Image: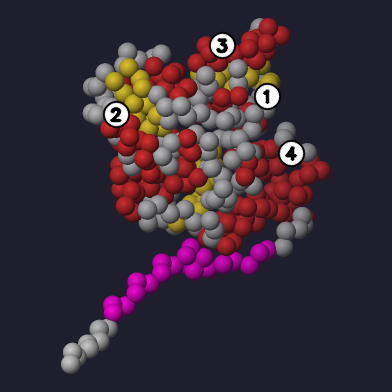
Amino acid sequence: MTRLETHTSAEAPRRPQTAAERFGVIERPELKYTPAVARETAHLYDRVRRHIPEIEWPVYAPYIHAINRIKKQRGASILAHNYQTPDIFHCVADIVGDSLQLAREASLVDGEIIIQCGVHFMAETSKLLNPDKTVLIPDMKAGCSLSESITGADVRLLKERYPGVPVVTYVNTSADVKAETDICCTSSNAVAVCESFESDTILCIPDEYLAMNVAKQTKKKILTWKGHCEVHERFTAEELLAYKEADPTIEIIGHPECHPDVIAVCDYSGSTAGMINYVKDTRPSRVLLVTECSMASNIESEVEGVEFIKPCNLCPHMKRITLPKILDSLLTMTEEVLVDPAIAGRARLAVERMINLKN
């Protein structure tokens, strides 16, 4: 007769704590526009009075007041992209900028909590650079048409098709895609990144128009992927020429995610940070920004004597981020952005190579 032996199984691994369990949940405050709230937010209203009617401020102010109080209580930093609305950009954000600026600043944040007011790939990038910090995004559905145009599996197939060709991947991608690339780039440094390789052929993915615009500035052969930003691909050269015909003095400033025909009509082309600096430095009397509409409003709050013409193409994903959602994120510590450890290291390396690249 065979003797049956019993074995004590190893204790099952414990479920990792959620952000809410680690930091606790804060009770929702009363959101009333009291005289005290009015006084304490008056200086913030001065920044956005050109975009928020005074009659509407009592709706915004209680949220702004609560967010600024609770983020200090949490020791949290709010990072906001240039495409966020003025109430977020000017009234609650601690750090603002384009993708490259936010990537750099995310690695310098002191506190334990980062609230990413942008889209999901930006929050992932912050997590890659801050693996020991808690990164939250107020709406997990804030995606990106460009990021969703390509997968890690797609990149692996490209590498099989073009063996040995360096892969330069736009930062507007998932961590899964970044993990398969040699180095990331942004619209502000894409040419420099491509030029950093000795190879005469470069895979520059996934933004087709950015890659085409890079190709016009380098002797290298640039291989592309048909990914597009749903905001920037809406602009046409015909539309911009009509503005020029109506007013030849208008200066048109375009983003490299636009079609090369659009960029050819522009007086200047650059990243969102480059566009902002151009306006601040040159102070054109009338300017049209060929990019997401909220950025014009954010710059308008900071410069005098510049009239902004706004062909208002909004990013539906950026606009998922709102003051109520930011407040809920701070109170309940949701939604937490995590990156699979199996790909995080390789993805982080691609981002760090970009940040550390010496032009």
Residue designated by label 1: 310
Residue designated by label 3: 265
Gap between marks 2 and 1, in whole Å? 43 Å
Give the quadrant of residue 55: top right
Q: Are marks 2 and 1 in contact (CB under 8 Å)?
A: no
User: Tag 4 or tag 3, which sits nearer the N-term?
Assistant: 4
Residue 211 position within the rendered picture, expressed as x and y whole percent measured from the top left: 42, 22
**Kind of residue sitting beneath label 3:** Val
User: Tag 1 or tag 2, which sits nearer the N-term?
Assistant: 2
Asked whether, in this view, residue 302 is left or right of residue 20, the answer is right
Asked if the stretch drawn in magenta spans residue 163, the answer is no
Give the quadrant of residue 196: top left
Residue designated by label 2: 161
Residue drawn at x 76%, y 50% is 59
Residue placed most toward the observer, 57 or 181: 181
* Magenta range: 9-29
Residue 17, numbered label: none
Which corner quadrant holds the C terminus?
Answer: top left
Asked if the stretch drawn in magenta spans residue 28, the answer is yes
Reply above or below: 71 against 42: below
Residue designated by label 4: 52
Question: Callout 4: helix, strand or loop?
Answer: loop
